[in-house]
Image: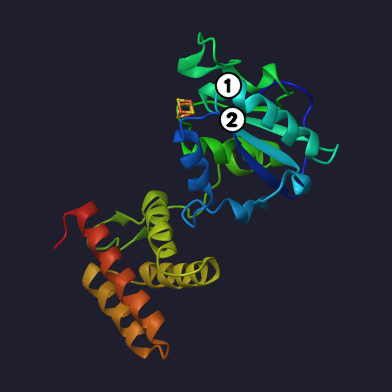
Amino acid sequence: MGGRPRPRFRSVWVFHVDASACNGCDIEVLDVLTPFYDVERFGVKLVPTPRQADALLVSGSVNRQAVIGLKRVYEAMPPKPRIVAAVGACAIAGGIFYDSLAVYGGVDKIIPVHIYIPGCPPRPEAILFGLGQLLGLVNKKIEPRILYPGRRVLDRKYGVLFNERLYKDLRYYLTRYVGYYDRDYILDDLLEIINSSRTVEELREKIMDKASRLKDPRLREVYSIAGGYIVEKIREETGAV
Ligand code: SF4
């Protein structure tokens, strides 16, 4: 982090500039836009023109060809807030090209930079973290939170804790199959079943029974898949058969 003090936003529209990057950073920037990382859920939207952009994501070490374009893009942005994020080692200080005569060696040699996102290339999580800093989200998001205080389930026979880690794994697993709303709803329901079961077998039967009573075939499928996953995880954890 460095440069001028950063304003806080509720959402931010960004324009991506490739200032002579090798495309490694650009691919990672595209990665955060995919449904897997889904940066739009934080209010970050990629726009097709700098005239609509609150922020620039710049990758590359800025060679002599790129510098004119970069300046033009920066000047085309609305005067406020004009945030600039340097993405990758090249954009921060030239990276592996730092001593090349052909490059300026960093975006901040040309325009002011607010956020530096390191890496060669930075991982999508690092880009998300940088954008989270921009939005003032990070402190809120990384505060430790107990999502599911590990209650003892199936305790009579196996003494298993369906703990925080298993809870997160299950939540992540469900995200592949259903939207966020349905995921949380299904997760709550499954946890209730888990907590009311005494053995793995009973748990499996209850989940399958619940699935068979559902009218929506998509939900039936999700419950069946999730049921199999939970049983497998608990068995892995306990060695129960
Ligand atoms: S930081 Fe690495 S990945 Fe990114 S543009 Fe430079 S060399 Fe390529």
Q: Is mark 2 within 8 Å of ligand 1?
A: no
Amino acid at circle 1: Asn
Q: Determine contact: label 1, label 2, CB under 8 Å.
A: yes
Q: Is residue 233 left or right of residue 3?
A: left
Residue at position x 36%, y 54% in the image? 166
Residue at position x 67%, y 43% in the image? 15
Residue at position x 58%, y 15% in the image? 105
For residue 19, the mark is 2
Which colour style is shown?
A: rainbow
Locate the C terminus and report the quarter of the image it occupies: bottom left
| Residue at the farthest left position | 241
Whether residue 222 can be seen here: yes
Q: Within the image, what quadrant is residue 134 found in?
A: top right
Q: Secondary structure at mark 2?
A: loop
Check the image and report above or below for 20 versus 229: above
Amino acid at circle 2: Ala
Q: Nearer the viewer, residue 163 or 127?
A: 127
For residue 107, the mark is none
Q: Is residue 146 left or right of residue 159?
A: right
Task: Name the residue tied to disc 1.
Answer: 63
Q: Position of residue 224 (x, y in %)?
A: 30, 76
Near mark 1 (Cα within 10 A), the count class, few <14, some 14-19 or many ≥20, is: many
Q: Position of residue 74 (x, y in %)?
A: 75, 33
Locate the N terminus and report the quarter of the image it occupies: top right
**Which of pointers 1 and 2 lies earlier in the amino acid sequence?**
2
Near mark 2 (Cα within 10 A), the count class, few <14, some 14-19 or many ≥20, is: many
Q: Secondary structure at mark 1?
A: loop
Residue at position x 53%, y 25% in the image? 118
Alpha carbon distance from label 1 to label 2 = 7 Å
